């Protein structure tokens, strides 16, 4: 019975005033929980990639929730101030402005905040985008020389000695020119 | 100029969209499908192939979300929520007894929101295009009398039940179902557009350059 009353009261409140911020904040909250959970449950990805992606997804929604609320409420308050002479007009303008505020948040504010804030936060947390082609780290052994000269046991006497040409040089390091 | 802005800000049609969960979520998802890829494309830190790939992926994700939302979630939750509220929760009280379905209520609500009584009465006398019956014939006498009043009853419990079921449907659809559907759809679509191979090639080239340098 208690649950039924809660639902009835919610219906009454939503029927009287269904703020545009309610649904977007609800979606962002559930997304912020479910998307990182789904990512962490993916068995095909590497743990580092999963951790990075899940945190990024979570952070996006953490930024989105207050951004939706702030933009919606600020726009609504502004409309009430501008149309303070006519109460009926002010109420309608507040609804419209709140919706516009939420739209502005979805179109500009959230993508901009995410592109500015997420990378520094991830860097501070010590998480960097994992390379897809990255090989698993090998155990450290003795350091190897970058280039070792080929060992020819004995010179072949039936062949003319070959000159060390430009192209036979070791193909490592910075090369300038067309070769 | 100020008059035009004022007209837009106090527009009754815009107010009804703002109060409607389905329409407002659809508009916001459309805006997201423009805004997010746009911000990826103007990012100067990424190379052009990766930008194209990431922007197309984000656009396809939002487009899939919108399609799933409009095709599946809206009809199922709107109709189901109304039926559940009418039959189980409110048991044909609090205004539910006057309406057979959501469509009927939404039509009534639109008329009730119209401030002009004359406009309302003119609409009631109009014929429905699908059948040769008049609009007023789909309403009972209580609703017809309400529409003649200056401030007609708006049946907030009915509106609230419709909006609550829409919010639940939106959350389930956009946060849980749509990402699963888009996951299955996005990669074949990117391959079809030739963007996935291009991105892999770009990554490989980058890797080769990194190892050579």
Image: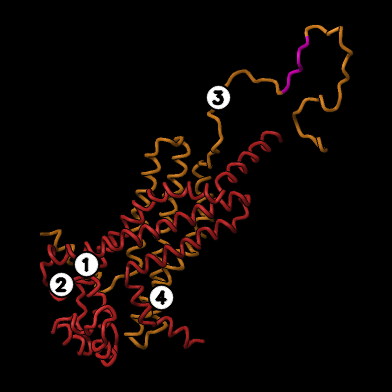
Chain colours: A orange, B red
Alpha carbon distance from label 1 to label 2: 10 Å
Label 4 element class? helix
To the question of a shared chain for discs 1 and 2, the answer is: yes
Residue A138 numbered mark, or none: 3
User: Which residue is identified by label 4?
Assistant: A97
Q: Specify start and end residues of the magenta stretch as a single range.
A: A147-152
**Closer to viewer: mark 3 or mark 1:** 1
Residue B161: which numbered mark, if any? 1
Task: Give the prevailing secondary structure in the magenta stretch.
Answer: loop
Instruction: Work out whether residue A127 or residue B135 is closer to the camera in this orientation and state it.
Output: B135
Return the mark for residue A2. none
What is the C-alpha distance between the residues marked 4 and 1? 24 Å
| Viewer-side label of 3, 2 | 2
User: Residue B78: which quarter of the image?
Assistant: bottom left
Residue A106 falls left or right of residue A173: left
Which residue is farthest front?
A: B132
Give the Cα separation between the discs numbered 2 and 4. 31 Å
User: Residue B57 at x, y = what percent?
Assistant: 50, 52
Kindly identify the residue that appears in the image at 39 percent across and 82 percent down: B11
In the rendered image, the vertical position of residue A156 relative to residue A34, given as above or below: above
Q: Is residue B158 left or right of residue A165?
A: left
Residue sitting at x 48%, y 65%: A107
Task: Describe residue A50's horizontal placement relative to residue A115 as left or right.
Answer: left
Label 1 neighbour load within 10 Å: few <14, some 14-19, many 20+? many
Labels 3 and 4 positioned on one and the same chain: yes
Q: Which residue is mark 2?
A: B96
Are the residues flagged by discs 3 and 1 from a single subunit? no
Q: Secondary structure at mark 2?
A: helix
**Cβ–Cβ below 8 Å for labels 1 and 2?**
yes
Nearer the N terminus, badge 1 or badge 2? 2
What is the chain letter for disc 2?
B
B122 is higher (above) or lower (below) than A47: below
């Amino acid at each position: 019975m208690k649950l039924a009353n809660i639902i009835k009261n919610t219906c009454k409140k939503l029927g009287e005033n269904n703020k545009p911020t309610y649904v977007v904040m609800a979606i962002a909250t559930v997304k912020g929980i479910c998307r990182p959970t789904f990512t962490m449950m993916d068995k095909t990805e590497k743990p580092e990639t999963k951790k990075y992606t899940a945190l990024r997804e979570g952070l996006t929604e953490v930024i989105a929730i207050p951004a939706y609320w702030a933009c919606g409420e600020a726009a609504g308050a502004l409309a009430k101030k501008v149309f303070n002479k006519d109460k009926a007009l002010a109420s309608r303008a507040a609804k419209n402005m709140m919706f516009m505020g939420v739209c502005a948040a979805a179109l500009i504010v959230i993508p901009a905040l995410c592109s500015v804030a997420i990378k520094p936060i991830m860097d501070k947390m010590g998480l960097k985008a994992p390379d897809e082609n990255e090989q698993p780290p090998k155990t450290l052994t003795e350091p190897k020389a970058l280039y070792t000269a080929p060992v020819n046991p004995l010179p072949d006497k039936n062949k003319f000695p070959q000159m060390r040409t430009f192209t036979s040089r070791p193909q490592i390091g910075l090369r300038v020119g067309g070769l | 100029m100020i008059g035009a802005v004022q007209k837009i800000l106090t527009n009754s049609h815009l107010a009804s969209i703002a109060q409607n969960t389905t329409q407002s979520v659809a508009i916001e998802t459309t805006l997201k499908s423009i805004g997010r890829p746009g911000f990826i494309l103007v990012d100067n830190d990424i190379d052009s192939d990766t930008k194209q790939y990431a922007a197309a992926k984000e656009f396809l994700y939002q487009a899939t979300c919108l399609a799933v939302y409009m095709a599946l979630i809206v009809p199922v939750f709107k109709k189901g929520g109304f039926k559940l509220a009418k039959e189980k929760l409110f048991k044909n009280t609090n205004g539910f007894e006057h309406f057979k379905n959501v469509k009927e209520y939404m039509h009534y609500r639109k008329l009730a929101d119209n401030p002009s009584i004359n406009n309302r009465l003119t609409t009631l006398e109009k014929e429905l295009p699908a059948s040769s019956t008049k609009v007023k014939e789909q309403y009972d006498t209580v609703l017809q009398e309400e529409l003649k009043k200056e401030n007609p009853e708006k049946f907030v419990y009915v509106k609230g039940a419709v909006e609550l079921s829409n919010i639940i449907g939106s959350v389930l659809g956009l946060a849980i179902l749509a990402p699963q559907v888009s996951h299955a759809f996005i990669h074949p679509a990117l391959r079809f557009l030739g963007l996935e191979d291009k991105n892999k090639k770009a990554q490989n080239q980058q890797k080769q350059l990194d190892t050579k340098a």
